[in-house]
């Protein structure tokens, strides 16, 4: 590989990493306009393993906006990112796949000052990306929730 090709690969990896970070920030901040802009035209997301829906980015953004509104605090941590270029069907060299693990603590609205999260879940994301004239965009996001922890049931004092 030449230095020019190696530099291009490094630049692509940085751009892909930035896109995944922007995805997490958009979800955590509830910025559904930015969330939708991160996808290609016709891009889709599948949250069924976490009790959600599967659909185009607009449909899923609407569902997320409604269902995540009960959480005053959300913090996606997307780690162990494995990036592979050129792995989608009909590859033209402008595609990538990212598999990454996530940890997601959330705090319900109305619980007072944010302290410990009320719900924590974890799992793995599968991202399919496509290079577009606007840069790298998400073609598909699939969530594989592996576990969920709810707060212990509390009994009111007599």
Image: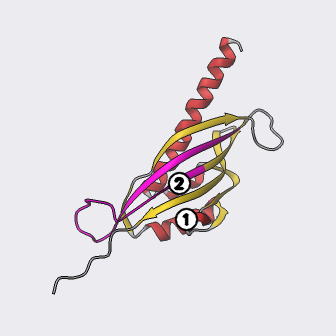
Image marks 2 and 1: residues in contact by CB distance under 8 Å: yes
Q: Main secondary structure of the magenta part?
A: strand
For the point 38% across and 61% down, which residue is it?
Answer: 106
Q: Position of residue 103 (x, y in %)?
A: 45, 52
Q: Position of residue 139 (x, y in %)?
A: 68, 49
Give the residue drawn at x 57%, y 68%: 52
Which residue shows up at 54% across the image and 37% down it?
17
Q: Earlier in the sequence, mark 2 or mark 1?
A: 1
Quarter holding residue 145: bottom right
Counting from the top left corner in percent of width and height, residue 51 is at 56, 69
Horizontal arrangement in the rendering, residue 106 relative to residue 136 (left or right)? left
Q: Could you say whether the residue bearing mark 2 is in a helix, strand or loop? A: strand
Name the spot of residue 146 as percent of width and height, x first. 54, 58
Q: Which residues are magenta?
A: 96-125
Say which residue appears at 70% left-offset and 52% top-offset.
Answer: 41
Q: Tell me if residue 52 comes above or below residue 8 in the rendering.
A: below
Q: Which residue is mark 1?
A: 50
**Label 2 belongs to which residue?**
123
């Amino acid at each position: 590989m030449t230095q020019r090709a190696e530099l291009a690969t490094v630049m692509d990896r940085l751009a892909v990493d930035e896109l995944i970070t922007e995805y997490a920030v958009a979800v955590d901040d509830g910025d559904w306009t930015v969330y939708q802009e991160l996808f290609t035209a016709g891009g889709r997301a599948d949250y069924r393993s976490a009790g959600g829906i599967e659909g185009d980015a607009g449909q899923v953004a609407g569902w997320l906006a409604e269902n995540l509104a009960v959480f005053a605090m959300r913090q996606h941590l997307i780690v162990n990112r494995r990036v592979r270029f050129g792995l989608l069907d009909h590859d033209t060299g402008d595609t990538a796949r990212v598999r990454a693990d996530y940890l997601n603590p959330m705090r319900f609205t109305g619980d007072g000052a944010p302290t410990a999260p009320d719900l924590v879940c974890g799992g793995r994301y599968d991202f399919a990306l496509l290079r577009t004239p606007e840069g790298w965009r998400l073609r598909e996001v699939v969530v594989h929730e592996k576990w969920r922890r709810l707060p212990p049931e509390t009994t009111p004092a007599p």
